[in-house]
Each structure stands twice: as structure tokens, then as C-alpha cells.
């Protein structure tokens, strides 16, 4: 039988000499009655208990799946950081061992760690396998006057020159060219041509070109274009010398090239129609949004779009895919809902998602299917398939599946800025959406929410929050890759993006549908009205005080810590997430504390920068292109143009030059010398702290010497003055040997093509009187490779086209030469 209830007894004093615990509520009395050590112990125990509860909540079933792509991406980054190409069997063995560990610990808590390690190993193996499948030969030494026969795979129209990707079918190197160490010439090359002379996609052509290895990083930590081109199968870049000569089409044509040629013709026709109906920047931007062709946008508008953080509108990516799919989905679903028999009995939502998926695929093909567009389509497709399967569209799980799919297909995308910024913005938006559904999604039980929805307040607030969240999430990546911040980016996006989403893109899609029927003109003009508004916003924001935010370059460390902080903030649901805010603050402080280099040296040694007493870089270059100067100034947060940084002497403390060489001084007064003759070494070795030269120094030189042999091993260099010594930071460590950055090797001298050497196919004799496609030096861009002037760099006794120099005019370069309105 239960004991009868006893009334509560008043608290009795404990016996003398015995310790007792404090009764409930006693701590609310006088402060002097609380035993401090016991209080601290209780608080620590309570905090540990709470942390344990939070940890168990974060480890609940389903909570760890979004971390799998993070682990997979870690494996990709480990592959990229390797000094030598990993062995495929080793990567496969590591994954097999990790999977065995998962099986062995499947009933233990340690299985979570094993799964994470397996995901890292899977990312490492996927990237290693991807590198093996690409296996693109890379040019190691510049080649002047190589004669190529091939088929145009891609064509890009730029502002001042055009560019084509050529699949090489035959190559005839010049007589004195060095053969690649493995005897393999690049299978694809990307060459610049004069504006308006680019052949169409699918055309068989013969060209004479100057080829250089893909552009390496111009400073430690800089963007590695060579790696990007390698995974696209391109092993050399350069520019055409002379005419582009048509060749007979091959007997057996590649199906992909035939399809690409047909698509390029359709894109060109749409581009011409849009610009005919909508001239000027409006038509150029409209064509960029529909066909992906961005060559006709004026520099003023393009720069304003970048400064105002609206440049993402010009590059077809996730936003454009989402708008296209969303508009088509809404229209189709609304139309089907008007038929009661279908709306009540059929899955019209799934049908609309299927139609939207087809529309997104067509948009992918029409826009040129660039790398960023393909990633955006893949993510959009996963979301639409989820809708077709009655799954929630916007979830962290869906985003994780999309990220894994993208990385499995193209693991190298992890190190690309567009991938990082796209998924960072999407991750932050999805996390905010999931955490704020109570006010983002209308509730029938909330009268206030219904009234706010009718007034449009919720939509306006959601737009503000989305712009702010996406801007903050991508700030660290924009600062790392582009050294720029957009202080008024949120303002510009709030003013322009509703018009782009609600008017510009829908009008463009409808115009595209009506184009075959001839009723598209009014739609392009309506689209132009919205574009004019966006352009006006961009120009206005770009003109505001402090609109251009510049930031000096920082290392990969702060970027990794900031990325981890963003992931922790977005993926965790307990108060543990605020540790991510601490990581973000720490990353920002780390980035701001990054020391700036005192000396920068380009990979070829033709450009040297020295930080003077005023804290700014002064540059001396002997090449004709200011590629390194522009990159260094941007990484230094310096708004000056290259010409201002390259000024000699004067109050700025620039280089002082004479016929024997140039000298500049660091902030501590020590000299940096760039000798041009052997006679200059005597004086420079006695007085200078650092010598940068392509010549070998004399024995016993007291100064530190950076010569061409060292630069071949290290690539571009950054040096910091510490006391009486220099701390040298190389772009590539000693012993590094990757497919896109092979270790320096002595290449064999190429055989005489006239002797019928194996592996070299002589080209047919070219016809004459064709327009010259050689681009002007000032029309070349950084991706075309560091090179000298096309004519002045020709070897002695050779013309720019690589043929023996003969007196008299060349018909290819005189009578048929088009006007060069953009020449300096």
C-alpha cells in the first residue's frame, strides 16, 4: 500500500560538524552564503551537460549527410596540394581501406569518423582518376611559328580580339623548335585572332601561331590558369601569325563537333537578331543573357557592373537557370491548373517540373554550355527531380546531393571561384530559409502573416535578406580571388534584381519563343527597358563615394578558416553554430594581418616589382605586356594603372636605369638591381642586396641572386625583407611535378620537318591573299600567354609568320589587311 502523503517539513539544521548541500532556492539569498567553489563546479558540470546535449543533437540521424560533400571537397583539395601526381592504385587502396574501416565500425560510434575519412578518400580518388582521364599534353617551351592544321571546337568573341580552341590534327614545328620531353604535342590549343577573323565552329583551318605554355601563376597564391586549362584538355595558348587558311573538311567528322557547329550557328543567328532589334549596350546585355555572348558590352558598363556587384547577371549561372526554370514551372503549372480535370486527378506539379527541366536543358545548350552553366544546370535538375518525386526543393540535403554530383562529374571545380561563390551563396540562403520558414512561408493560422503577404512586406524583406545573406557569404571568396569588395552591392542588387527577375528574363524567354514566328521585336525592346534600368543602377552605384573596395591579397589559410566558419554557421542547428562566427572573425583578422611582399618577380624574370619607402610597388618590365603588373597591383589593393607603377625615377622612388641595368631601393634603403649586361655585375654584387638577372652571376657575388635557372624551378617569387635577409616564397616548391606544371626538363631538339620525321605531318602549301588574323599586342589578354610583340619578337631572319624574311610586301599582310580601328 502506498505511503500516506507527509507534509513537507521545514529545513532542519544539520548536525554540528557535518557538511550539507544547499537546499533549493537557498542560492537566492545573500551572496555571502553561496560557496564559490561549489557554484563554479556546478556551472561547469551544467555547461558540459549542455554541450553534450548539443553534440548529440548535431549527431542525430540525417544531420551529418550535408557534411559528406565537405569531406569529399577536402579530398579534392588534398589532390591539388600534392607536389607530385598521386598514383592511381594508391588512391584506390586508400578508399578501399577507408571502406573497410566503415564496415568494421558499422555498429560503433567511430563509424561516423570512418565515413568522413572514406568521403575524403573518395574525393581524392575521383580527382586522381579525372586527371588520368584528361591526360592532356602540355607545351613546355614557347614555340614561334608552329604550323597547325585542325578543327575549330569553340569560338569566343571578345571586346578587342577573338579566340578559338583548335583540335590539332597535324603540326609542323619550326626547324629549331624543341620537342616536348615525351614527344607529344598538345592536342588542343587556344589561340587569339584579330577581331572579326575567327572561323566558325566546325571549320577545318590551317594557321601559323606562336604558342606558349599555359600561363602559370604570376605570384605565389595567384590563380593557376594552367591547371584550369589542363582539365579542359588545352595544352598551349598563344596567337595566330598571318592568315587563317580554310582546309578541306575531314572525311570522318566528329559528331560532337557537328552538333557544336549547328548550335553555334543558332546562337549566332539569335545574337544578330537581338542586336538588330536592340542596339547598343542593351542589345549586348540581352544577348549575353540569352546566348552567353558577352563581347559587345562596352568597357564602361562592364566595369560599372563589376563595381556595383551586378556582374553576376552577365554570366549565365545558377541565378539564370533558377529564373528560367521557375518561370516555365510557374507558367506551365498555372496553365494546367486552369483545367479542373487535370488539376484534381493528375500530378500537374510534377508535369510542370518536367517541362521546366527540358526548358533548362535547352537554355544550357543555347547559352553555350560553359563550365559554370553546366554546374548550375546540374543543381537545378536535381531540385526539379526532387519536385517530381514530391520532395522539398530547397533543403540542405538537396544542396548536398547537388554538390556531390557536381564534384563527381568535375572535381576540379572545387578550386574554381564560380563554384565556391555559387555554393556559398546557396548554402547561406538555404540555411536562412530553413531557419526562417515561420515568416518566409505564409501560414493560414497567422492573420498578421496574411496581411503582410497582401501588402508585399514579406517579399520585400525576403529580398533584402537574400541580397544581404548572399553578399556576406561570398565576400571572403570575392576578396580572395578578385581582391575587391562591393560596399554598395546590396543596394545595387535590391534596386536592379527585381526588375531583372520580373521583367528582363521573362521578356527574354517569351521573345525567344516568339522569334521563329517573327513577333519577337517588342519583347526584345521590353527587355531592353529593364536592362536600361539595371545599367542606370550600376552606373549610379559605381559613381558613389567609396564604391570600389580594394583589399590586399591573403593566403589560403584565412579562406579555409572562413569557409569552415560559414559551413558551421549554416549546417549546425544548436547554439554550437555560433562557433562559426568566431571562425569568420578569426579569418578576417588573419587576412588583415597577412604581410605584403617587398619584392615580386614574374616567372620569366622579365618583370620585377619593389616596394619603395612610400609603401607602394614600383615595377620594371622588359616584356611588352603588363600582365604581371596588373595582377600585382590588384593583389596589392592598389588602384593605379600599370603605367603609373612602371614610371622610372622621380619622387616615387622608382627604378633608375642606365644602359647597363636598373636599380631600385627598398624601404630600408637596400638596393635591388636588375643588370642588363655582364659588366654591371661587378658594381651590383658589391652594393645590392638582391640581383634579378637572366645571366649567370660571377663567382663570389655577395648579393642574393635570382636567375633564370632558379625561376624555372620555383616559378614566380615573392620576397620579404627580414633584417638583413630575404624570406623567399615560391609559387612551386622544389620537386613539384604535376601534369599542368611539369618539372623543368631538357627537351630534345626537334627533327627537321622536311626530313619526314615520325609524328610530324607536313602541312599543305597555303593559298595567298587572305586577311591577316594576327592580333595587335594591346588586344591580347592575360589568358593568351605572356609574350612579346608578334612582329618584334620574331627570330632574326624570320617574319612574324615564321617564314624566311624577304624584302617586299607580303600579300597576306598588306593588300588584304583590314582596318585596325582599335590599334593604339
Image (cartoon, helix red, strand yellow):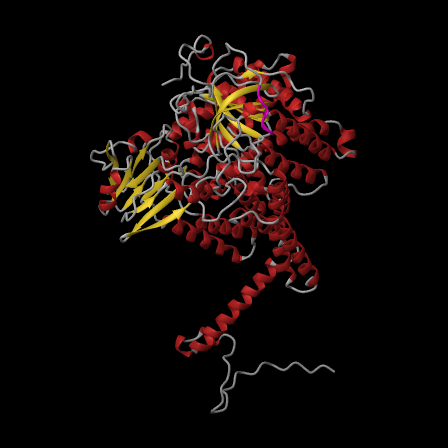
Residue 221 is at least partly visible in this image: no
Could you tell me which quadrant the N terminus lies in?
bottom right
Position in image of residue 50 (x %, y %): 54, 65
Position in image of residue 708 (x %, y %): 38, 40
Residue drawn at point x = 68 percent, y = 82 percent: 4
Residue 576 is at least partly visible in this image: yes
The reply to whether the magenta stretch includes residue 44 is: no
Near-viewer residue (238 or 61): 238
Near-viewer residue (815 or 32): 815
Near-viewer residue (446 or 693): 693
Mark count:
0
Magenta-highlighted residues: 756-763
Near-viewer residue (279 or 823): 823
Give the residue furthest to the front: 755
Give the residue furthest to the bottom: 16
Could you tell me which quadrant the C terminus lies in?
top left
Residue drawn at point x = 50 percent, y = 20 percent: 284
Residue 550 lies, with reference to residue 161, above or below; the image says below
Residue drawn at point x = 50 percent, y = 16 percent: 243
Provide the major secondary structure of the magenta segment: loop
Residue 41 lies, with reference to residue 295, above or below; the image says below
Position in image of residue 141 (x %, y %): 47, 34
The reply to whether the magenta stretch includes residue 759 is: yes
The quarter holding residue 109 reads bottom right
Give the residue furthest to the left: 651
Position in image of residue 27 (x %, y %): 46, 74
The quarter holding residue 675 reads top left
| 350 relative to 375 in the view: left or right | right
Amino acid at each position: 500500500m502506498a505511503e500516506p502523503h507527509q507534509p513537507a517539513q521545514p529545513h532542519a539544521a544539520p548536525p554540528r560538524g557535518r557538511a550539507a548541500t544547499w537546499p533549493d532556492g537557498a542560492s537566492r539569498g545573500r551572496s555571502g552564503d553561496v560557496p564559490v567553489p561549489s557554484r563554479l563546479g556546478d556551472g561547469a558540470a551544467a555547461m558540459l551537460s549542455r554541450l553534450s546535449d548539443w553534440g548529440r543533437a548535431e549527431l542525430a540521424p540525417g544531420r551529418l549527410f550535408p557534411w559528406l560533400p565537405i569531406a569529399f571537397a577536402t579530398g579534392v583539395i588534398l589532390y591539388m596540394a600534392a607536389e607530385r601526381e598521386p598514383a592511381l592504385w594508391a588512391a584506390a587502396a586508400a578508399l578501399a581501406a577507408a571502406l573497410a574501416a566503415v564496415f568494421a565500425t558499422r555498429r560503433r560510434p567511430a563509424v561516423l569518423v570512418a565515413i568522413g575519412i572514406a568521403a575524403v578518400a573518395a574525393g581524392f580518388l575521383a580527382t586522381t582518376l579525372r586527371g588520368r582521364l584528361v591526360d592532356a599534353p602540355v607545351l613546355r617551351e614557347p614555340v614561334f611559328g608552329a604550323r597547325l592544321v585542325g578543327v575549330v571546337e569553340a569560338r569566343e568573341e571578345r571586346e578587342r580580339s577573338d579566340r578559338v580552341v583548335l583540335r590539332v590534327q597535324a603540326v609542323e614545328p619550326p626547324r629549331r623548335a624543341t620537342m616536348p620531353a615525351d614527344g607529344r604535342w598538345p592536342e588542343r590549343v587556344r589561340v587569339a585572332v584579330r577581331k572579326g577573323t575567327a572561323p566558325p565552329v566546325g571549320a577545318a583551318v590551317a594557321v601559323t601561331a606562336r604558342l606558349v605554355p599555359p600561363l602559370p601563376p604570376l605570384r605565389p597564391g595567384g590563380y593557376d590558369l594552367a591547371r584550369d586549362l589542363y582539365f579542359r584538355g588545352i595544352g598551349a595558348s598563344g596567337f595566330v601569325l598571318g592568315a587563317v587558311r580554310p582546309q578541306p573538311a575531314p572525311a570522318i567528322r566528329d559528331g560532337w563537333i557537328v552538333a557544336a557547329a549547328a548550335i553555334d550557328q543558332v546562337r549566332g543567328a539569335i545574337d544578330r537578331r537581338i542586336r538588330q532589334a536592340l542596339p547598343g549596350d542593351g542589345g549586348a546585355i540581352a544577348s549575353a543573357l540569352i546566348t552567353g555572348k558577352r563581347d559587345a558590352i562596352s568597357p564602361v558598363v562592364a566595369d560599372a557592373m563589376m563595381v556595383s556587384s551586378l556582374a553576376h547577371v552577365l554570366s549565365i549561372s545558377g541565378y539564370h537557370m533558377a529564373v528560367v526554370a521557375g518561370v516555365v514551372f510557374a507558367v506551365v503549372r498555372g496553365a494546367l491548373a486552369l483545367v479542373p480535370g487535370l488539376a484534381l486527378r493528375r500530378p500537374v506539379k510534377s508535369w510542370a517540373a518536367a517541362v521546366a527541366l527540358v526548358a533548362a536543358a535547352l537554355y544550357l545548350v543555347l547559352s553555350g554550355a560553359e563550365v559554370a552553366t553546366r554546374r548550375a544546370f546540374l543543381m537545378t535538375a536535381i531540385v526539379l527531380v526532387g519536385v517530381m518525386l514530391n520532395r522539398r526543393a530547397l533543403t540542405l540535403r538537396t544542396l548536398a546531393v547537388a554538390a556531390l554530383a557536381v564534384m563527381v562529374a568535375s572535381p576540379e571545380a572545387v578550386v574554381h571561384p564560380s563554384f565556391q561563390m555559387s555554393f556559398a551563396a546557396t548554402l547561406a540562403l538555404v540555411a536562412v530559409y530553413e531557419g526562417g520558414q515561420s515568416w518566409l512561408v505564409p501560414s493560414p493560422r497567422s492573420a498578421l502573416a496574411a496581411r503582410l503577404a497582401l501588402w508585399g512586406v514579406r517579399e520585400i524583406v525576403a529580398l533584402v535578406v537574400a541580397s544581404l545573406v548572399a553578399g556576406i557569404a561570398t565576400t571572403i571568396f570575392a576578396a580572395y580571388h578578385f581582391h575587391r569588395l562591393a560596399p554598395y552591392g546590396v543596394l545595387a542588387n535590391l534596386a536592379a534584381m527585381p526588375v531583372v527577375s520580373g521583367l528582363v528574363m521573362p521578356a527574354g524567354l517569351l521573345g525567344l519563343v516568339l522569334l521563329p514566328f517573327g513577333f519577337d521585336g517588342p519583347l526584345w525592346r521590353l527587355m531592353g527597358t529593364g536592362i536600361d534600368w539595371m545599367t542606370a543602377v550600376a552606373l549610379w552605384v559605381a559613381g558613389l563615394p567609396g564604391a570600389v573596395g580594394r583589399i590586399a591579397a591573403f593566403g589560403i589559410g584565412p579562406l579555409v578558416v572562413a569557409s569552415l566558419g560559414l559551413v558551421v554557421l549554416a549546417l549546425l542547428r544548436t547554439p554550437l553554430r555560433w562557433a562559426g562566427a568566431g571562425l569568420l572573425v578569426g579569418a578576417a583578422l588573419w587576412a588583415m594581418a597577412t604581410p605584403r611582399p617587398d619584392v615580386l618577380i614574374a616567372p620569366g624574370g622579365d618583370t620585377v616589382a619593389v616596394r619603395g619607402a612610400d609603401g607602394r610597388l614600383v615595377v620594371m618590365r622588359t616584356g611588352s605586356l603588363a600582365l604581371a603588373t596588373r595582377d600585382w597591383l590588384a593583389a596589392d589593393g592598389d588602384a593605379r594603372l600599370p603605367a603609373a607603377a612602371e614610371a622610372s625615377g622621380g619622387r616615387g622612388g622608382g627604378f633608375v636605369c642606365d644602359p647597363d641595368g636598373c636599380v631600385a631601393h627598398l624601404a630600408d634603403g637596400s638596393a635591388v638591381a636588375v643588370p642588363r649586361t655582364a659588366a654591371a655585375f661587378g658594381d651590383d654584387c658589391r652594393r645590392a642586396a638582391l640581383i634579378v638577372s637572366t645571366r649567370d652571376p660571377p663567382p663570389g657575388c655577395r648579393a642574393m641572386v635570382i636567375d633564370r635557372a632558379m625561376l624555372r624551378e620555383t616559378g614566380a617569387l615573392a620576397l620579404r625583407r627580414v633584417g638583413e635577409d630575404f624570406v623567399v616564397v615560391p609559387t612551386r616548391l622544389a620537386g613539384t611535378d604535376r601534369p599542368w606544371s611539369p618539372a623543368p626538363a631538357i627537351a630534345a631538339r626537334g627533327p627537321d620537318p622536311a626530313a619526314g620525321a615520325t609524328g610530324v605531318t607536313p602541312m599543305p602549301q597555303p593559298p595567298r591573299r587572305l586577311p591577316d588574323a594576327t592580333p595587335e599586342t594591346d588586344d591580347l589578354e592575360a589568358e593568351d600567354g605572356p609574350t612579346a610583340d608578334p612582329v618584334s619578337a620574331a627570330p632574326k631572319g624570320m617574319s612574324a609568320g615564321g617564314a624566311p624574311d624577304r624584302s617586299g610586301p607580303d600579300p597576306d599582310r598588306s593588300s588584304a589587311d583590314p582596318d585596325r580601328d582599335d590599334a593604339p
